[in-house]
Amino acid sequence: MRVWMWTVALVAAAAVGGCATTTPPAKPGKPSAEAPSKPKPLAPGLDPLVHADAFPSTYRPMPSRPTAVVGAAVFTGTGALIENGVVLVKDGRIEAVGPNLPVPAGYETVDGRGKWVTPGLIDAHSHLGVYASPSVPANSDGNELTNPVTAEVWAEHSVWPQDPGFNTARVGGVTTLLVLPGSGNLIGGLSVVLKNVPARTVQAMKFPGAPYGLKMACGENPKRVYGSRKQFPSTEMGDVAGYRQAWADAEDYDAKWKAWEKEKKGAPPKRDLRLESLAAVLAGRVRVQMHCYRCDEMATMLDVAKEFHYHIASFHHASEAYKIPDLLRENETCASMWADWWGFKMEAWDGIPENISMVEAGGACAMIHSDDPNGIQRLNQEVAKAWAAGRRAGLEISKAKAVEWMTLNPARALGIDKETGSLAPGKMADVVIWSADPFSVYARAEKVFIDGALAYDRDDPGRQPSSDFSLGSMGGER
């Protein structure tokens, strides 16, 4: 075992040296020159956030009451564990968190003795609603495989709110999720952040004020889809050329609009929904979420982002992120990873179970993700596996820190960390009470609060919402 652990460390060190060559390292202690800048001005005709008013969030928190969870072991989501903790919730927000806090009069008290508490879990990569259950062609709405660049499509326009997967994810403690288009295109479209509440419409699930994301994909998927059709792109170099041309076209489109805005002569340029979304990324208003496995491809995409002055919020899947934590740290780019999925195709071949822990140890932003309707139901167990693998390799990461991989770090990647992701006063009261240490395979989410409202209770059938679609199935979704 000791020999194996040293082998992992030596292989990782060599791999970092081999893949960290395209971007010079930043000086220690100084912020990267490529840190994301403030959003740039964008003509109204180019900004999908302006036009998103046609599809506004109608989310309203469910009714809640002042609540105190008393006596639990509380993971705050900020790297701390509070023994015999008290969590006070009022008006849908966290009011206070600390050891042995007094409970104000009129608060409903939940006995947390012997229980554990975390912030609501956040899945940074899901296709719930766009690849809904049951998995039949009629419910396959995640990939618009008609052009390598389909930035004009929005995942929310495919989301089916009755997907039973939303309910089973809630049973697993997931309160917020990013729903993305699929990965068959170079640029697949806009993603949407959802609150995991029962709803009739996607607008009623949309996280208020959450930034949009742009799904991009590098590597095998786009070249397989279009190469099999004898179309462009069919190679890695074709992939990169396709991204660069799309961004160049967006720059040209943006320039034409700005010239018209300045002169206001003649008719304005015709709106192009595809280029409109890309221009919003260049302006810093839409966050890039990029499917990418290999370290060399991630390094290349960081260089493309520098060329066109945009920022990659997170690489998804990122099986080889452990080789480039320095690049991720310097570019303020996160890695959204699995615990131990590897080897199912060549670009995933060099994945290791220490991946997440090594990215964390390298000072970069690390997190778990599911990309799977089953995995989303046990993100806590996936984090436990990744944490344990790191410990076996000699990486002394605390459980309290690892909790951030499924709470605060995904919130950071999605741009919603000021609202959720930790049990900090003033944030949304997204709270999970666990039957045991959430790093145990025996732990179950007993109660799930979303904005302070009890959205799921394992002991109360009346607090176990079921999709209309699955009402007639035996046993429902439990």
Image (spheres, rainbow, N blue to C red):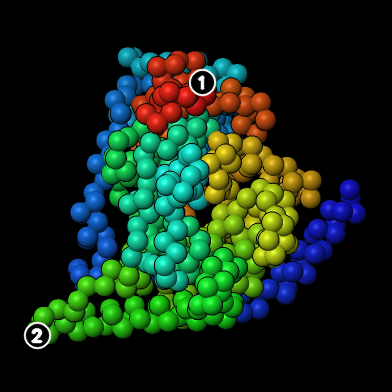
- Count of numbered marks: 2
Where is residue 50 shown, x and y percent of the image? 22, 60
Dot 1: element: loop
On the image, numbered disc 1 is attached to which residue? 475
Residue sitting nearer the eye, 463 or 151: 151
Residue drawn at 61 percent across, 31 percent down? 438
Question: Which amino acid does the dot numbered 2 rest on?
Answer: Lys
Whether residue 27 is visible, yes or no, is no
Q: Residues within 10 Å of mark 1 (few under 14, many from 20)?
A: few
Where is residue 112 shown, x and y percent of the image? 53, 19
Whether residue 436 sits left or right of residue 130 in the image: it is right
| 233 relative to 179, above or below | below
Residue 81 found in image quarter: top right
Question: Which amino acid does the dot numbered 1 rest on?
Answer: Gly
Which of the numbered marks, if any, corresponds to residue 265?
2
Whether residue 155 is visible, yes or no, is yes
Which of the numbered marks, if any, corresponds to residue 76?
none
Mark closest to the chain's N terminus, 2 or 1: 2
Whether residue 82 sits left or right of residue 140 in the image: it is right
Residue drawn at 40 percent across, 17 percent down? 462
| 437 relative to 114, above or below | below
Residue drawn at 54 percent across, 67 percent down? 225
Residue drawn at 38 percent across, 54 percent down? 155
Where is residue 93 shown, x and y percent of the image? 35, 33
Marks 2/1: CA–CA distance:
65 Å
Residue sitting nearer the eye, 39 or 383: 383
Q: Are marks 2 and 1 in contact (CB under 8 Å)?
A: no
Dot 2: element: loop
Where is residue 340 shown, x and y percent of the image? 69, 49
